[in-house]
Amino acid sequence: MRYWIRTASALSLTAFVILSMTAASADDKVEAAAKVVGQASNEKLLAELQRRFEKKRQASKSPSDKVLKRGLVSPLESLDDATLVEALKVTVRTRTIYGADDRKDWYEIKNNDVKPLARASVALVNASDTSLAAGQISLKARPLRQTMGLCAGERYGAQPAAAFCSGTLVRPDVVLTAGHCVREISDDQAISPVTEVRFVFGYRMEKSDYDPMKLRADQIFSGKEVLAGEKNESRDWALIRLGKPVPAEIATPVTDWDTGSVSKGQKVFVIGYPSGIPLKYAPGAEVRDIASPGYFVANLDSFGGNSGSGVFDQQTKRLVGVLVRGDADFVQDEGKNCNRVHVCPNTGCRGEDVTRLSVVSLPQ
């Protein structure tokens, strides 16, 4: 799983054609170029990419013709193709040219209808990665940039990666997650038994410089038993009973389920813990494929660690599915020997699979 590029009409084609015609530029030029790109509006960037695309297209038809330009050359125009592309790679996460990484931290969520759903989202953490002292729980985890070997500048690289899966509180003492996140369902011996898993509420960024690794003891719950679940090519879900109910002041269960049909093009969003980092809300996705009776496919901004996340209808805010699998999260930047987020055009790559609620046993 990874975040998806949101493309704007001809923008994707323009950018990727230019990318295919260029070679990597020198590092010492990219930083200055990134500043130029960062100061330009999306409209100016689009116009510049289209101008270059048209220039290359015309040159391919009449190689001998020279393109003449009068007047001043803008800072964008002064960049060669390769340097511009490298600069766009640096600024891609804030550009609608290639699309935006739609993930938002807790403190960035402004929609009051989404906040209760985010509170009901729970991080699955191994008991061995928690410690209790003076009534406070501390999580043990390295920064994402270390666990994933990320390149400098990759988003959220400094945030800790403590969770191995996500879930949603659906009854005061029941969590819905993915079947492959549960040892008793998946038969994966590398996963801790459910009684050795801690279900952590409030693992989130309260502000930009917040430390999410310190939590109150009443925010963490032990798993008690597996109530039901499946793990196969079509169905992947599990219901876990906690050792005790979650108080309403911590989280209220998501009981508004939509078990009806899902439509192609339906707008959806996901809430969970991508790559194990603190809670992220990722809106702006849509359903791409509804062929399977057990799951649907959507271009959600999700990563490993999001497995088990709740997927919701953007308009009604009703729970419609459980995120279970997707494409590769990261790709290697061979020139720098580090990893970058794997990005795809909106209509490209495979998509993220979401188990339909219609195949999940309704908890009592």
Image: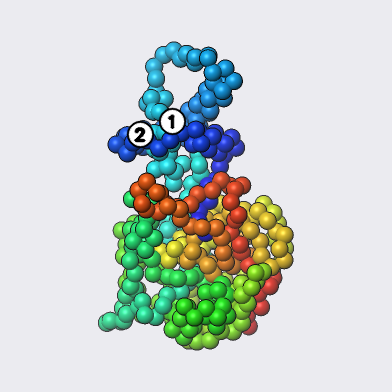
Q: Answer with left or right where residue 332 lies relative to residue 259.
A: left
- Image coordinates for residue 348, horizontal then vertical, percent: 59, 48
Alpha carbon of mark 1 to alpha carbon of mark 2: how far? 11 Å
15 or 135: nearer the viewer: 15
Residue 81, labelled with which disc? Answer: 1
Q: Residue at x 60, y 56 (%)?
A: 351
Q: Answer with left or right where residue 78 lies relative to residue 64.
A: left
> What is the three-letter code of the residue carrying label 2?
Ala
Q: Is residue 112 above or below residue 363?
A: above
Q: Is residue 201 above or below residue 135?
A: above
* Residue under label 2: 33
Q: Residue at x 68, y 73 (%)?
A: 359
Cβ atoms at labels 1 and 2 below 8 Å apart: no
Q: Is residue 104 above or below residue 43?
A: below
Q: Residue at x 51, y 58 (%)?
A: 328
Q: Residue at x 66, y 61 (%)?
A: 296
171 or 194: nearer the viewer: 194
- Image coordinates for residue 286, horizontal then vertical, percent: 62, 53
Question: Which element carries disc 1, helix, strand or loop?
Answer: helix
- Image coordinates for residue 277, horizontal then vertical, percent: 41, 64
Instruction: Give the number of the mark in front: 1 or 2.
Output: 1
> What is the three-letter code of the residue carrying label 1?
Asp
Q: Is residue 154 visible?
A: yes
Residue 219, labelled with which disc? Answer: none
Q: Is residue 15 visible?
A: no
Question: Which element carries disc 2, helix, strand or loop?
Answer: helix
| Crowd class of label 1 (few under 14; some 14 to 19; many from 20; radius 10 Å) | many
- Image coordinates for residue 349, horizontal then vertical, percent: 58, 51
Q: Is residue 55 above or below residue 221?
A: above
